[in-house]
Image (cartoon, coloured by chain):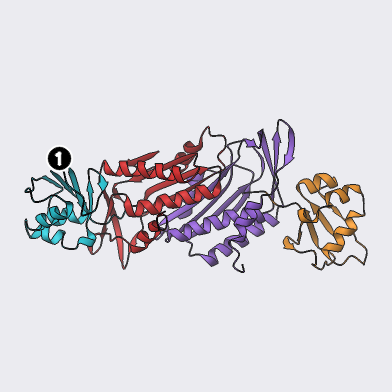
Chain colours: A purple, B red, C orange, D cyan
Amino acid sequence: MIRVQREDFDTGKELDALTRDMTSVGGVTSFVGLVRDVAGAEKITSMTLEHYPGMTEKLLAEIEEEARRRWPLAAVLIIHRYGELKPGDRIVLVACASSHRDAAFDACRFLIDWLKTKAPFWKLEETSAGARWVDAKDSDDDATKKWDKSS
Amino acid sequence: MIRVQREDFDTGKELDALTRDMTSVGGVTSFVGLVRDVAGAEKITSMTLEHYPGMTEKLLAEIEEEARRRWPLAAVLIIHRYGELKPGDRIVLVACASSHRDAAFDACRFLIDWLKTKAPFWKLEETSAGARWVDAKDSDDDATKKWDKSS
Amino acid sequence: MKLLYFAWLRTRIGKAEETLDPPAGVTTVGELIEWLKARGPNYADALKNPKLVRVAVNREYVTLAHALKSGDEVALFPPVTGG
Amino acid sequence: MKLLYFAWLRTRIGKAEETLDPPAGVTTVGELIEWLKARGPNYADALKNPKLVRVAVNREYVTLAHALKSGDEVALFPPVTGG
C-alpha cells in the first residue's frame, strides 16, 4: 500500500492497521525518516518537499511490487509526505511485515534505499543563509546499487 | 533505554518519545515482534512468556551498551513483554535512532538477532493439542553469530 | 509535447511546465535537451551539466537515446533527494 | 547456593528454585550438573541433554568449566526463545 500525502501520519496507528487481522506475521520492520534541523553549518528553519504527482505514485507502486517479488511479505506500507515540513517532522514511513524477520529487514532497507535515489522528491531547505535545494548524495546511489541484481 | 514489562505498549507513542527534542536524528528503524497464531500444524490459542527477572534487565542494558559502542546511535529503545499474550499481540519493540540510516538498520537488526538467542525469555504455546515450550531455532543462532566480531 | 520541470531546474528555467513543439530534427531526449539549451540562457544554465539532469517520459525514467513521440509528457529534473 | 530453573527445565524438575549445599567435590558448573542428575529421575531427565542446558551464574552466562563460589545464584535453563 502506498500513499503520497501532505498530512502527517500516526506511526503507531499505521503499523497496527498494517497487520490487523493477519494471522502469521512474525514481525514488522519500519523506518521513519525525520526532518533534521542542521545542514552543514546552518540551522534549518523549514523544509519543503516538492514531488512529481502521478509519477511518484506510479514508481512507489512499482517498487512495492518489486519488493513483494523479492521477499515473502505479508504487508508493505510506504507513506511519503510532501509540502512544507519543520525540523523533527516525519517525512516518510516504510514498513514491511513478514513471517521471516530477515525478509522484513531486507525489504524495508531496499525500499528506503530505493526511495532516496529514485522517487521523484526534492528537498528545499530554508536556512538562516537563505533557501537551497539539497544535493543528492553519492552514498545513497551506492546504497541503491547494492540491490541491483545485475551487478 | 530498556523496559521489561507485562503491559502492552503503544508503538507510535514510544517511537515519538524516543526522538522528541532531538535535533539531528535522520531516521528511526524499528522492529515489532508479534505473536503468531500458528505453530506447525496447530493453532495457537495463547502464549506465555517466562523470563528471568533481574538477568533479563541486566543483559538488555549490556546489549544496548554494546550497540551504542558499535554504531553512532542517538537513541535506543528495547521493550520486551512477559506473561500471557494472545495471537496478534505485540511481544517486543526494538528501535534505533541515528543520523545515519545504515547505523539505525544494522543496530536494530543486531539487537533483535541478539535478543532471540541471548535474552532469557521462553515461550510456552497453548494449542489445541496442549501446551508446549517453543524450541530454539538454529537459524536464530546463526543470525547472532554473524555479529560476532571474533568470527 | 508537454514539458515539466522540477526543483532547481524549474526555478532556473523559470516555469514549472510548458507545451512546446520541437522541430522535426528533434527525435530523442538528448536532442530535445540540446534544442532547449539553445532557447535561452535560463535553459542553457539549467541544463548545462548533463550529469545533473534526469529525464522521465510519460512518468518513466529514460536515457538520452530514448525516442520521443508527439504527445509525450517529458519531465526534466535534478537527482532526487526524498526519503 | 541458590538454584533457579526456568521453562521446561523448571517443569521437569518440578520446582522453580531451591537452596542446596553441594558437597566439597563440586567445584564447577559441570560438576554441579552431574551431582544434580544423581539427585533423582526428574533432575536426570531435565538435564540429560547437555546441549539443551544453559547456565548463568550471578546472572551472567558461563561455561561448564566455570568455578562456583558459595553464595552463587546458579540458573539452569533451556536455549532461550524470546524476541
- Which residue sits furthest top? A128
Where does the image place residue B11, in percent across and percent down from the top left? Answer: 44, 44
Residue in front for this viewpoint, B25 or C3: B25
Taking C25 as reference, is B28 above or below it?
Answer: above
In the image, taking residue D10 as reference, residue B39 lies left or right, namely right
Q: Nearer the viewer, residue A122 or B119?
A: B119
x%, y% of residue D8? 20, 56
Instruction: Between residue D24 and residue C41, name the one nearer to us.
Output: D24
Label 1 packing within 10 angstroms: few (<14), some (14-19), many (20+) = few
Amino acid type shown at disc 1: Gly
Side of A45 relative to A98 (left or right): right
Q: How many marks?
A: 1
User: Which residue: 21% across, 50% down?
Assistant: D66
Which of the 4 quarters of the picture holds residue A64? Answer: bottom right
The quadrant of the image that shows the C terminus of chain A is bottom right
Name which residue lies at 13% across and 52% down: D32
Residue C5's place in the image compared with B68, above or below, is below
Q: Is residue C20 visible?
A: no
Q: Is residue A63 visible?
A: yes
**Local SS, label 1:** loop
Q: Quadrant of the N terminus of chain A?
A: bottom right
Q: Position of residue C69 (x, y in %)?
A: 83, 67
Does residue D31 appear left or right of residue A64 in this picture? left
Q: In which quarter of the view is residue A36 placed?
A: top right
Q: Which residue is mark 1?
A: D71
Q: Chain of mark 1?
A: D
Residue A45 image point, x, y percent: 66, 32
Q: Residue at x 81, y 53 (%)?
A: C49
